[in-house]
Image (cartoon, coloured by chain):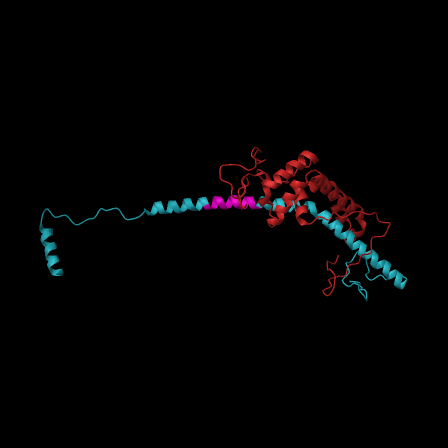
Amino acid sequence: MLRERLEEDEEQEADDCYFPPQRNLPAPGFKPAALVLGMGAVCVWGFWKLGQGIREQNELAREKMWSRIHLIPLLQAEEDRDLARRHMADQAREKQLTGDNFKVYNSDRFVRPTYAVTPANTTK
Amino acid sequence: MAARKPIFNQQVLVDTTPLPDSVPKVNEVGATSAPLLSASFFIGARCRPYNDDYMQCKTENPGKGEFECMKEGRRVTRCAASVVDDINKHCLDEFRKHWQCLDNNNHQLWQCRKDEWKLNKCVFDNLKLEKTIPEAQGIPVHLRSKQIYAHYPALRDPGQAPFKKAVDAPGAEAPAS
């Protein structure tokens, strides 16, 4: 079979009218350059949208941060007043029980108490 | 200042002794997180000087601010309470709609722009307090008519047909800087 074909080819090459079986057909699918360009376009679009999202998130974070900045003094003042109230009540109770306020720390800073005296009998 | 809170796991023990009479009385604001978040920029707009005074006092008295800054703290609380009272007096419906929307949307401000715009307009008309975000880039984010992260378009109600507005955006004509 193969031998026959080879002989046939030789005969054909000897022929003057022979020209080789060249196939000038276009390659199937998109050209590589078009594929790369398309991928580039998709990526550019995606990063553009990503940038928009990040910028908007930054602004939303700024908004949230400022709302908290406006609220912090209010919340801190309430907490501090509560701490002062408890501390003064503690001091008054100590003075009533022992006649004097024992100085626990060698500084005049306010130290938030870790331990608290609890009543023996709770009402509720 | 040690930030350790005494916590009782077995029972709730609260020392109810009031402050001594030498300290002037002040009513606490008593609002929960969503109303405070909703009113925060108006509190900031009216009470910025008091807030700054208080924070300066706290910075200058490290470790003693709890007692040294009580006067400034009372001013801060009174000012914020006045803002919340005024909003309640003039814009109760809009205020309620906005903070309930915040409560329903995980406190995400961008989900509630429609209610926020109505509240901002009412507060500006009645109290002359304006929400401004310092150092904002471009159109301030609370004025943008397009919210990328919102569940629903800012100008339409959920389920509404497209190409119709439920509300006008206040930032549509705002200049981009």
> Up-down: is A10 above or below B85?
below
**Relative to B124, A80 lies left or right:** right
Observer-nearest of A36 and A94: A94
Image quadrant holding the N terminus of chain A, namely bottom left
Residue at 62% across / 44% down in the picture? A63
Q: In which quadrant of the rendered view does residue A9 lie? A: bottom left
* Residue A84 rendering spot, x and y as whole percentages: 80, 54
The main secondary structure of the magenta stretch is helix
* Residue A70 rendering spot, x and y as whole percentages: 69, 45
Residue at 75% across / 52% down in the picture? A79
Q: In which quadrant of the rendered view does residue B79 lie? A: top right
Image quadrant holding the C terminus of chain A, namely bottom right
Q: Which residues are magenta?
A: A46-57
Instruction: Inspect the magenta stretch and tell me whether residue B135 lies in it.
Output: no
Residue at 76% across / 45% down in the picture? B77
> Up-down: is A93 above or below B21?
below
Instruction: Inspect the magenta stretch and tell me whether residue A47 lies in it.
Output: yes
* Residue B57 rendering spot, x and y as whole percentages: 77, 47
* Residue A108 rendering spot, x and y as whole percentages: 82, 56
Observer-nearest of B14 and B23: B14
Residue B52 visible in this rendered orientation of the protein: no
Q: Residue furthest bottom?
A: A120
Observer-nearest of B8 and B57: B8
Shade representing chain B: red
Task: Give the chain coloured cyan.
Answer: A
* Number of numbered markers: 0
Observer-nearest of A51 and B166: B166
